Amino acid sequence: MATEAIRMAEIGGTTRVAMVMATIRQRIAGRSLTPGAKLPSVRGLAATLKVSTSTVVDAYERLVAEGAIHSRPGSGFYVASETTPLSLIDVGQRLDRAIDPFWISRQSLDAAHDDLKPGCGWLPSSWLPVDGLRKALRTIARAGEPALADYGSPLGLPLLRQLIARRMADRGIEATPDQVMLTESGTQAIDLICRMLLEPGDTVLVDDPCYFNFQALLRAHRARMVSVPFTPTGPDIELLRKALAEHRPRLYITNSGIHNPTGATLSPVVAHRVLKLADEFGLTIIEDDIFADFEQSPAPRLGAFDGLDRVIHIGSFSKTLSASVRCGFIAARSDWIEGLTDLKIATSFGGGRLAAELVFAVLSDGGYRKHLEALRLRLSAARRDVGAKLKVLGIEPWLEPQAGLFLWCRLPGGLDAADVARAALARNVVLAPGNAFSLAQSASSFLRFNVSQTTDERVFDVLQEALKDAKGQN
């Protein structure tokens, strides 16, 4: 009997509360209660619906918890304002669509297979170890069911983490496999770090110019960005010190091996001074090292000098192995890896085991080392040949990079790179205008060229025409 009474009370209470909640939701959906409108008083609605005041109070409290309404102490309950979807363009300064941080990515990713993409950031598929990938896929296809069907552990495939730790040691970075966590990409690595270390409104330092997707990702985290000019040997140290003193940033994101977009290499002297400033101002540094395998000889690494104390080192395999195989990593202090592992579980659950197995199979095969040796030579020749052809058009490289994909080039006569990029796009050629990389909007006369994607003679024909079009607009 007592059990029946309890059951009836639960049904009755739940039904009446749900009925009140449904009534309010219907009024909001029907716009009889608009955003900001005051809801009926508890007593008034209770009388109208013929329920107790405690039922209405319970319903209102649950609607508050849902975010549908909110309470103003001493005043009553009000319909919540409509949530505006996050617009990454509106988070930061509005820019001309041709030069915002998303333009290059959208045009490059949406381009047809046979379109020319000297502005994109990856190798042509014919330059990648496709035969090695096929061999690795056949090996994995014969593996046991767990490799093909199970979730990976949150840290990621142990064998691949061990291999990554050994590869980092070749660049002077000491880390145990337990200090390495696999991610779906280099971008996810930065996203997880930002989730762990940033609050909306925190300040983050970036290079000027810097990889445009750093800006896009930081906008998504509602961070405040401050830029520091980048020189051929690293960030301008005096201006870095000034920015640290004035803005007290939480993070600094940079490339120290092969810088994107300039192709510059961090010098040991500048690296030492950057780390001294980081220690003085309590700065954490994200060192993005996704171009490491392009190097002929290792450049200085902040993570090596710092011992992964204030530096978080990240990388991926999309540039030299395959953009379709999404696999990256984070190397950091053990206590930070613990927090990042929890975030990874919360946002993507287990690791991408199949991708990790594939990357390990390719990297542990002798063919990958030979592929890299041939690739470096091929890129060196392309940088030389493309640079010479660009100079004929009056387009001058900012410096001669020691390695990598990119030439950061100044246009002749102060032409606007955005105008040139639009003219080229009309001819199905995707370029990378400089201000997409510059938070200060100080690179309007620069273009970034990916030399591996600039070997087709049609690129230079289109460039010549686009330069003429841009001159005609001046």
Image (cartoon, grey):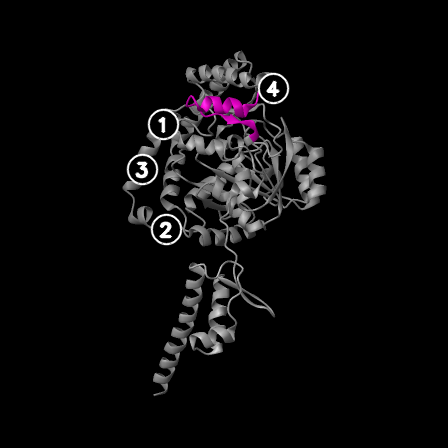
- For image coordinates 29% across by 47% down, the residue present is 144
- Nearer the viewer's eye, disc 1 or disc 2? 1
Please provide percent x and percent y for residue 21.
43, 68
Mark 1 residue type: His
Q: Which mark is residue 414?
A: 4
Q: Residues within 10 Å of mark 1 (few under 14, many from 20)?
A: few
Q: Which mark is residue 258?
A: none
According to the picture, the residue beneath numbered tag 3 turns out to be 137
Q: Is residue 373 left or right of residue 70?
A: left
**In front of the other: 235 or 28:** 28
Q: Which mark is residue 151?
A: 2
- For image coordinates 52% across by 50% down, the residue present is 337
Mark 3 residue type: Leu
Residue 419 shown in magenta: yes
Q: Secondary structure at mark 3?
A: helix
Q: Residues within 10 Å of mark 3 (few under 14, many from 20)?
A: some
Mark 2 residue type: Tyr
Which badge, 4 or 1, comes first in the chain's sequence? 1
Q: Secondary structure at mark 4?
A: helix
**Label 2, label 3: how far apart the Cα atoms are:** 18 Å
The answer to whether residue 413 is above or below residue 44 is above
**Label 4, label 3: how far apart the Cα atoms are:** 50 Å
| Residue at the bottom extreme of this rendering | 1
Q: Which mark is residue 113?
A: 1
Q: What stretch of residues is rendered in magenta?
A: 415-435
Which badge, 4 or 2, comes first in the chain's sequence? 2
Residue 396 shown in magenta: no
Circle 1/circle 3 CB separation < 8 Å: no
- Nearer the viewer's eye, disc 4 or disc 2? 4
